[in-house]
Amino acid sequence: MPLSRARIVLIAASGLALAGGLAVFLSAPTQEPAAGIALAPDDPAVVAEGRGVYADQCASCHGADLQGQPNWQARGPDGKLPAPPHDPTGHTWHHPDSVLFALTKYGPARMIGDPAYKSDMPAYDETLSDDQIIAALSYIKSTWPADIRQRHDRINEQARQN
């Protein structure tokens, strides 16, 4: 579903509990994502492009089958969280499209405004175009079962209303 063309505001999902009780607070990135972001999980061409982008840029950490890394909910000795799954067992679908886009484009440290935040997740703003990011996210969403996609659509609707 397309987002409004108005400025995309990322509302803090304060207290968003990740498994293991970790809370992540999200805020607006320092640069605004492109207006009019719309994932297209039902568009075969976009999904095919996204499958390739995912394979090239994401699968090495998040897994070829979107399964994520083992023990993804627990920080390692380096203080970093392993890459989470993007399948229905993970929390990707708990975030609206605008948050997923900003997280991918800007990386977690810049997105939350904490340059000291430790993560292996890179920012893709200089590697991928907005369309490639949208395609990769569309591919991910295309793999979710209908009930998860419907729940994600409701999350998007709530985000648009805020």
Image: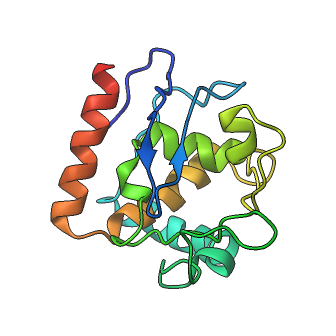
Residue at horizontal 48%, vertical 81%? 67
Query: Could you say where residue 32 lies in the image, as x and y percent from the top left?
Result: 64, 24
Query: Could you say where residue 92 lies in the image, as x and y percent from the top left?
Result: 44, 58
Q: How many labels does the image show?
A: 0
Residue at horizontal 74%, vertical 37%? 110
- Left or right for 118, reference 46: right
Nearest the viewer among 31 and 14 is 14
Q: In this view, does 136 lie above or below 33?
A: below
Query: Could you say where residue 21 lies in the image, as x and y percent from the top left?
Result: 46, 56
Colour scheme shown = rainbow
Name the image quarter holding the N terminus.
top left
Q: Residue furthest top?
A: 6
Q: Quadrant of residue 87?
A: bottom left
- Left or right for 160, reference 122: left
Query: Could you say where residue 49 lies in the image, as x and y percent from the top left?
Result: 53, 66
Nearest the viewer among 126 and 83 is 83
Name the image quarter holding the C terminus.
top left
Q: In which quarter of the image is residue 62?
A: bottom right
- Left or right for 153, reference 17: left
Q: In this view, does 111 lie above or below 88?
A: above
- Left or right for 114, reference 50: right
Residue at horizontal 28%, vertical 40%? 155
